[in-house]
Amino acid sequence: MTWARSSSPAPPTAEALTSFLLNAVGWLCSSPGAPVGVHPSLAPLAKILEGAGVEAKVEPEVKESLGVYCIDAYNETMTEKLVTFMKRGGGLLVGGQAWDWANQGDDERVLFTFPGNLVTSVAGVYFTDNKGDTSFFKVSKKMPKIPVLVSCEDDLSEDRDELLHGISELDISNSDCFPSQLLVHGALAFPLGLDSYHGCVIAAARYGRGRVVVTGHKVLFTVGKLGPFLLNAVRWLDGGRRGKIVVQTELRTLSGLLAVGGIDTSIEPNLTSDASVYCFEPVSDVGVKELQEFVAEGGGLFVGAQAWWWAFKNPGVSPLARFPGNLLLNPFGISITSQSLNPGPFRTPKAGIRTYHFRSTLAEFQVIMGRKRGNVEKGWLAKLGPDGAAFLQIPAEDVPAYMSVHRLLRKLLSRYRLPVATRENPVINDCCRGAMLSLATGLAHSGSDLSLLVPEIEDMYSSPYLRPSESPITVEVNCNNPGTRYCWMSTGLYIPGRQIIEVSLPEAAASADLKVQIGCHTDDLTRASKLFRGPLVINRCCLDKPTKSITCLWGGLLYIIVPQSSKLGTVPVTVKGAVHAPYYKLGETSQEEWKRRVQENPGPWGELATDNIILTVPAASLRALENPEPLLRLWDEVMQAVARLGAEPFPLRLPQRIVADVQISVGWMHAGYPIMCHLESVQELINEKLIRTKGLWGPVHELGRNQQRQEWEFPPHTTEATCNLWCVYVHETVLGIPRGRANIALWPPVREKRVRIYLGKGPNVKNWNAWTALETYLQLQEAFGWEPFIRLFTEYRNQTNLPTDNVDKMNLWVKMFSHQVQKNLAPFFEAWAWPIQKEVATSLAYLPEWKENIMKLYLLTQM
C-alpha cells in the first residue's frame, strides 16, 4: 500500500481508509490475537487501530511477538529484520511514495535503491517513481487487473550495459549445441542475445534484491568466445559484494574460464549458505523454493539449461509448466522453451534501439487492436503470437500478474473474429491477424471458453458442420510399444474443431504415461511469412485420469501416444465428441469395409496403414482408391528394402509415418516422425501406377534421412547424400527403375561431369557435399555391391564408444569398409580428399590393392 507524504505524520486520508486498514491488518495477521506494532513514524495509525478495538502499540523495532508491523517506506535501518519477520510469517504494512524521494536524491534507480523496495521487492512488490492518481479508486469485485507494462527501462538499461560491456555479439558458432529459446516475459527481465527472428538465447532479470542470468544451454558455460560475457555476468550477479562464487560440480569447466579472468570460484555439489553467486544447471525440482529465496534476498543465480530434449522425452507435457528449470525460473520472468535455436552469432541490444520484449509488444498489440491503427517493429507481432501461446502454458492460478494477461487476451480475442488462413487467402504472420492465430491456440489450450474464439468464416470441418456423434465412440487401441521412442497409435477418429472432447480409459491405463494428441500436422509455422493454416494446430495432453477433457480449437485426427517399451496391450478408449474417419489397415480391413468407410465416415483426413508405414492424406484423395491392398503391399516391399539396407529387423518395431499438409515448415518434404510433405505429393504416395512408373524419390529420400546414424554421418557433407543410397536401392531392387532414370542427377554423363568439376577445382573435402559426396558411395556400391553396406551398417549398430568428430569417423569408415571388402581403400578415399590419418593408411597397407579403383582413371584422364 502507498500513500502521499504530508506535513502531518499520518496520511491525510487515513480516516477515510479506516475500514480498509482494519481489513488489511486482519488479513496480514497469520496469528489471531497477536498484537500489531506501529513504527513511531506512523504513530497516529496506532490510535486509529486501537479505536477500532485492535491491540496496537508503537514499537521502534519489529519484534517476533508481533503479528503485523506497520512502517513507512523510508526506513533504511531495519531492512534485514523486516525481511526475516516476513519469512517467519509476519505481516508487513508499508506506506510511502517514491517519486518525491527520487527527485531529492542523486540515485534515480528507484526500483533497486528506494528503501521501501529493499524490503517489499522480496515479496514481488515495488514502489515506482510514477505519480499516482489522488482521486477516489473504485473497489473491484474481482482481482484488479495489473497493467501489462509499467515503464522501467531506465532502471534496466544500466544493468544491460554492465552485462554487455565490451561485447558486440554473443558468438556460439562452434559450440556444437542447439540452445533452447528463452521466453522473456517478466517486467524486470530483459534479453541479452537475439537471433534474426528475435529468438533469445541469453537473458537476465532482477528479482527482489537479487539477480539472475539464464543461458539456453549449459554448454554455453564452456564456450571460450563467451569468456568476456561470462566474466561480466558473474560480476554483475555478485553486485559488488566480492562474495563467494559457487560453481556446481558438473560445470567445473566454467570455473576454469572464470579463473582466467581473475575470478576465484568454489566447486560445490549444491548451493552453500555463504554463496554470493551460484552457477548451475537445474535438473530437478529439489530446492526450488530455497533458490528463489536466495535470489529474492540478494543472491545471484547463473543458470544454463535447455528444455527441448526434456520436451521430446515428455510429449504432451508443457515444459513451461513442468520442466524443472522452469519451476525455478518462471517467477523470475524468464522461461526456457522447447524451441531450439541455431548456433551462431547472436546480436546484442544496443542503447537507443528498441528491442523486442513480450510485455512491451503485447501492450502495443493491445493499443493496435483497440484503435485499429498503430505500428510495431518488423517481426515483433510474428514473435508475439508464439510467445503469447507459450506464456499461456505457465500455470497462472494464484498469480495475479499472469491472470491479468489471460484476461486481457480473452477480452481482445473475443472482441474480434479469428482469421481463417487458407492457401487461397493466406494470413500474413507478422501482423495482428497472424498473432491472433497463435494467441487463440494458447488460450484454447489454457482452458478458455471456446465460444469466445469465433472464426470469421465457419470451417466446414468445425463442430457446427461436422456434427460429432451424440453417443460416445469406443475404440480398441494397441498400447504396446516395442520401440525406443514414443509412438502415435491411430484411433480412426476425427475431432471437429472448436469443441471440448472427453476421453475415458480404464483406471490401470491412466497411470501408464499415455497421452492423447489431436491433429497430425505437427509442423511449427511460427517463422513462416504467410500462413495457410494456424501456425500450431495440434494439442497434446496427459491421460493421467480415467476421464479427461481436452480442448480442440482446430480439429484433427485423434491419436493415443504410447511411451517406449510399453506392454499395456489393447486398451478400450471411449471418446465423446468424435466422428469416424476413413481408415484402412492392410490385412485387417476388407475391401467392402473400406468402401463403406470412405463413403460414410465424415472425417476430412484418412489413413492407409500397414505394420511398417502409415500414410495420412485428405479423405477426398482416398475416395477414388477402390482397393488400397495392392498399393500398401507395394509400400511394404519398399519398407522392407529400407529396413534391409539399414540392417533393421523387419517388420519394423514401429511403423514410419508420412503426413501431407497444406503447409510445412521447411523444404518440399522433410524427415522426422512424422515425415511431412505438401498436398501436391499425395498422388505420389497413393497412386500405385505412378509409383511404379515414376518412382518415389522424395518420400524414400526422407525415409533414408530417418535411417541416417550419427556414427557414420559426416555433417554437413553427407546430410543430403547418404540418404539417397536408400533411394537408389529401393528404385532398383523394388521398382526396377535404374538410378540414371530414377533421378536425372544420376545420369552417367552428369555424374562424370560432376566428378571432373570436383577434381578440376582441386579435390577438397569442403566441396564434398550432396551429389558429389553420394558419388563416392555409389562408386563403392558399383564395385562391391550392396552387401558390404548392409554388413557395415549392422556392424555399426553393434559398436560402442564410437568417435564423434568427422575426421575420426571418416577414418573409421575407411577401415571398416576396407575390412568388409578385403581391399585397401585408403588410396581411393585419399583421391576424394578425405583426411586419411597416417596410422590408418599404414594399418591397411597389408590388404590387397584395389586395382579397379575408378578414381585412378579419373586422375589420369584429368591430367
Image: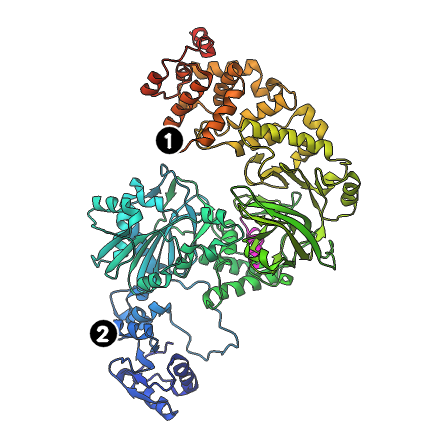
* Foreground of the two, 29 or 650: 650
Give the number of the mark in front: 1 or 2. Answer: 1
Q: Residues within 10 Å of mark 2 (few under 14, many from 20)?
A: few
What span is in magenta?
A: 430-443
Q: Which mark is residue 77?
A: 2
Specify whether residue 562 is in view: yes
Quarter-of-image position of residue 273? bottom left
The reply to whether the magenta stretch includes residue 435 is yes
Q: Secondary structure at mark 1?
A: loop
Q: Secondary structure at mark 2?
A: loop
The structure residue drawn at horizontal position 48% and vertical position 25%, both measured from the top left corner, is 792
The structure residue drawn at horizontal position 51% and vertical position 59%, both measured from the top left corner, is 392
Residue type at mark 2 is Thr
Examine the residues drawn in magenta and state their main secondary structure. Answer: helix
* Mark 1 lies on residue: 805
User: How far, Cα to Cα, is label 1 from label 2?
Assistant: 59 Å
